[in-house]
């Protein structure tokens, strides 16, 4: 296979060779396009503007330039501040996979990602600070927006990882079946509370992120901030609960 000149063509070939589902392929493409902005030392747009922006055209060889690694390092820190550590680390992982594949094709001579490492993520709360069934029910009865109510019920009823719940798109939901459209062993399933709220949340929408803000997909950081503030009055320590604790409580008590 001949070496492509343009970065965008290299992205297309990598995605064509990868064993990815439709949704994952779309996520990978968005992430790799985001790194293109970093390579020309520009800040990628966010939210709705990100989907409509025309990415910069650049040669694949730019990844072999001396300035490639420091620009990517700078961009990783900026992305972490903009979208959260977990999202930035996921985008880095996608870039590393693409670079490794391009190097295997002999399209790159160096590795601009060699010095990049995932950023440390917040540690889960200590086991001593657990949410009981009674506390979880009180949380789910808090006055909150429809988005938050649906998100909290989904976490508790499914026990799904927070990142997985936030990454859900409307077109991968089987709303009547109370599950995602995946194999039975990997599907996210939910109970009555989510089933009651979910149709109201997706009313009039057929695709796109399930949990959104005015700028795009709801981020982990913003979701955690909202949850912590809302649950502070219920937390005996006065700190507010963490989303991880609600998800773990759901798994522990087998709510679904």
Image (cartoon, grey):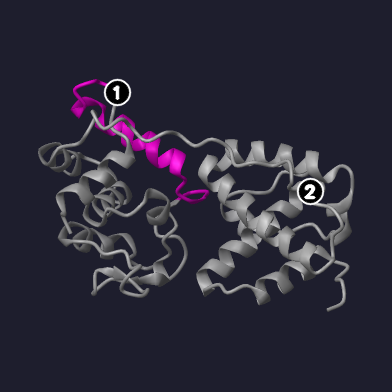
Toward the bottom, the furthest residue is 1
Residue 190 on the magenta segment: no
Toward the left, the furthest residue is 134
Q: Residue at x 57, y 55 (%)?
A: 48
Asked if marks 2 and 1 touch (Cβ < 8 Å), the reply is no
Q: Residues within 10 Å of mark 2 (few under 14, many from 20)?
A: many
Q: Is residue 143 visible?
A: yes
Residue 232 on the magenta segment: yes
Q: Which residues are magenta?
A: 213-239
Name the quarter where the N terminus is drawn. Answer: bottom right
The one of 6 and 146 positioned closer to us in this rendering: 6
Q: In the shown orientation, is residue 47 left or right of residue 242?
A: right
- Residue identifier under label 1: 239
Disc ID at residue 112: 2
Q: Is residue 84 visible?
A: no
Q: In the shown orientation, is residue 83 left or right of residue 145?
A: right
């Amino acid at each position: 296979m001949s070496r492509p000149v343009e970065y965008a063509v290299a992205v297309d070939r990598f995605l064509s060779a990868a064993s990815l589902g439709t949704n994952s392929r779309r996520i990978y493409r968005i992430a790799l396009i985001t790194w293109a902005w970093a390579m020309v030392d520009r800040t990628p747009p966010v939210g709705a503007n990100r989907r409509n922006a025309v990415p910069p055209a650049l040669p694949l060889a730019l990844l072999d330039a001396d300035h490639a690694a420091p620009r990517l390092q700078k961009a990783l820190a900026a992305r972490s501040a903009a979208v959260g550590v977990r999202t930035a680390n996921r985008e880095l992982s996608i870039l590393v996979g693409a670079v490794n594949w391009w190097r295997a094709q002999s399209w790159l001579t160096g590795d601009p990602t060699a010095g990049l490492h995932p950023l440390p993520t917040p540690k889960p709360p200590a086991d001593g600070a657990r949410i009981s069934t009674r506390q979880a029910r009180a949380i789910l009865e808090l006055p909150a927006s429809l988005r938050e109510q649906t998100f909290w019920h989904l976490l508790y009823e499914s026990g799904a990882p927070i990142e997985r719940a936030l990454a859900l798109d409307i077109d991968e939901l089987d709303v009547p079946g109370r599950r995602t459209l995946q194999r039975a062993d990997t599907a996210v399933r939910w109970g009555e509370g989510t089933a009651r709220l979910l149709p109201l949340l997706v009313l009039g929408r057929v695709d796109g992120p399930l949990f959104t803000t005015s700028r795009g997909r709801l981020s982990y950081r913003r979701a955690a901030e909202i949850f912590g503030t809302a649950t502070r009055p219920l937390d005996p320590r006065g700190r507010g609960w963490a989303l991880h604790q609600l998800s773990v409580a759901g798994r522990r008590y087998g709510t679904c």
